[in-house]
Amino acid sequence: MTSDPPDPGEPGGEAVARVRAMLEQDAATAALGIEVVALAPGRATMRMTVRPDMVQGHGTCHGGIVFSLADSAFAAACNGRSRGPVFAASAEITWVAPAFLGDTLVADAVEHTRYGRNGVTDVAVSRQGDGALLALFRGRSVQVSRTPAPRLMKGGPR
């Protein structure tokens, strides 16, 4: 991840520090090579470069990979305004244009509203080189009192 750690005394510094700590534990985001560009309460910018293992049979970046980038930025933005953990309640994406091998994708997330324990966050995914809009993502979030524990199933955790 990039950029310097926030000063907890700065406005929003505590929230940004919590988001950074959350992202340090996020193996899925790390495996995709997603890096933090900027964080602020209710906002996040993240980026990743499309690798060969992210390209599907038509030669474009798999839509699930673009969704995952947007989802990681969504998580960072909506957790940046809350003391308790915030999870996705639902999300949708509209793919506008394809991404290709070698493209660097940038996801800009903004939490537009928080009402009670719920929120709505929009994420625009664009290509870094030319700024072309590739996808629009909208996530609805819910704040919970604690992180859920894994369920124990027959044969161990799932």
Image (tube, rainbow, N blue to C red):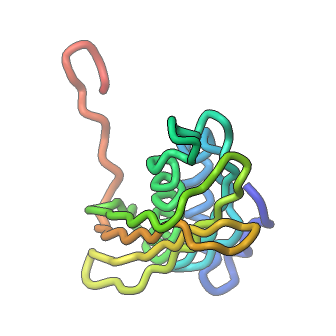
Against 149, is 2 above or below? below
Residue 93: image location, x then y, percent: 38, 64
Quadrant holding the C terminus:
top left
Is 83 situated left or right of 104 in this image? left
Q: How many marks?
A: 0
Please give the name of the residue rendered at 48% of the width and 72% of the height, measured from the top-left corner.
123
Please give the name of the residue rendered at 62% of the width and 60% of the height, measured from the top-left corner.
20
Please give the name of the residue rendered at 51% of the width and 57% of the height, measured from the top-left corner.
72
Looking at the picture, tell me which residue is in the foreground, 62 or 57: 57
Please give the name of the residue rendered at 52% of the width and 73% of the height, measured from the top-left corner.
124
Is 132 situated left or right of 4 in this image? left
Q: Is residue 8 visible?
A: yes
Residue 83: image location, x then y, percent: 43, 70
Q: Is residue 16 visible?
A: no
Residue 91: image location, x then y, percent: 32, 63
Residue 51: image location, x then y, percent: 68, 41
Displayed quadrant of residue 33: top right
